[in-house]
Image: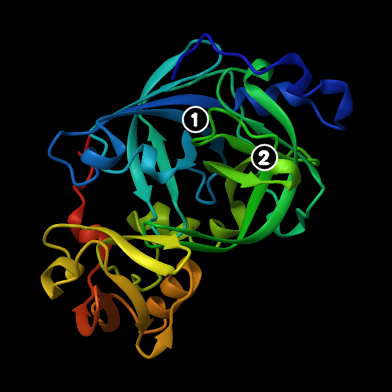
Amino acid sequence: MDDDWEIPNALQPDPVDYGFDLRPRLDAVVAVKSLIPPDAFTAPTLGVEREGSAVLIDAPNGRGGLFLTIGYLITEAETIWLTANNGRVAQGHALAVDPETGFGLIQALGRLDGITPMELGDSHSLKSGDPMILAAAGGASHAVAARVAARQPFAGYWEYILEEAIFSAPAHPHWGGAACIGGDGRLMGVGSLILQQGEPGGRRLDLNMVVPIQELTPILPALLRQGRSDRPPLPWLGLLAMEEEEGVSVGSVTRGAPADLAGVRPKDRILAVGGEGVTDLATLWRAVRAQGNAGVPVPLRLERGTRVINLTLMSSERRKFLKAPRLH
């Protein structure tokens, strides 16, 4: 991430507008740099060098130096560096990545003195129109004073769905792992991506999608205890899907994954899952999850050219395709 960038003054949060001390919250957000092996499963799509932000949080078991980030920054990471706003640097370890929520946890392996954890908030209370701050590492000049644009489901092409995501505007240009700070000064979520939405008159509105903290609190003890959630793993097919005017089609298939082994091909149109019609990404992923846990058969009805074909995929667990983090 380029350290020379700054948010325009008009978009930066003004400390006098908030009923809490803004500086320690911003100082809790640190820069993350991850190095991933070239042969890692996610290297071709996410790269071997990833940069973003993470926020220091309190752990329920009293573990110090625990940072929350967005999981794609540290998935299969071999080396992680954390840099605080005061210039202090520490190596980190990828403690947990939860593919269902998208969160990642980093354990600092050295001390980063001078920063205090941010308290976790109640993201259920965050509603459309509420003020918030989306803060990347670097202090006020790297933070955006924003508002909640919407609370609604989000479905991603990579077999991902959140039923109540946070959408914020104006958008932050360095959203990955940025801290979503609510009007009460507590952590409401972590930045995941940027989206473009059309407006009347042909204008474009850029939004950030934020994973709400409500997705973390039920699974945090298990992530700390065993590096993964206690919930049964969801069925994973190993395909990327795209929404088009005529429906949902397969963009690509992961080699060796269930979709590949069953004969699914790019450009196949997905008509139904287990008898339930598919009209968009959300209905697709909900229908797949409705079949059961990872390992369950997933019947797909596909349109390929002029033919309609039926295939049954033996779903797997996404984690099995990923490299485990190195132990330090």
Quick one: label 2 or label 1, which is nearer the N terminus? 1
Residue 53, position as x, y percentages in the image: 49, 30
Q: How is the image coloured?
A: rainbow
Does 241 sit left or right of 324 as displayed?
right
Q: Element at badge 1?
A: strand
**Pointer 2 local density, CA inside 10 Å: few below 14, some 14–19, many at least 20:** few
Mark 1 belongs to which amino acid?
Ser
Q: Which mark is residue 205?
A: 2
- Between 203 and 92, the one lying in front of the other is 203
Residue 306, position as x, y percentages in the image: 24, 78
- Between 181 and 312, the one lying in front of the other is 312
Q: Element at badge 2?
A: strand
Farthest residue toward the front? 306
Residue 189 can be seen, yes or no: no
Residue 125, position as x, y percentages in the image: 77, 57
| Quadrant housing the C terminus | top left
Q: Which mark is residue 261?
A: none
Residue 122, position as x, y percentages in the image: 71, 54
Instruction: Say if 120 sits above or below 277 in the image.
Output: above
User: Which residue position is annotated with label 1?
Assistant: 53
| Quadrant housing the N terminus | top left
Please tell me which residue is depicted at 51% across the width and 18% down the height of the picture. Answer: 84
Quarter residue 117 falls in: top right
Instruction: Say if 57 sits above or below 86 in the image.
Output: below
Instruction: Say if 226 sits above or below 49 in the image.
Output: below
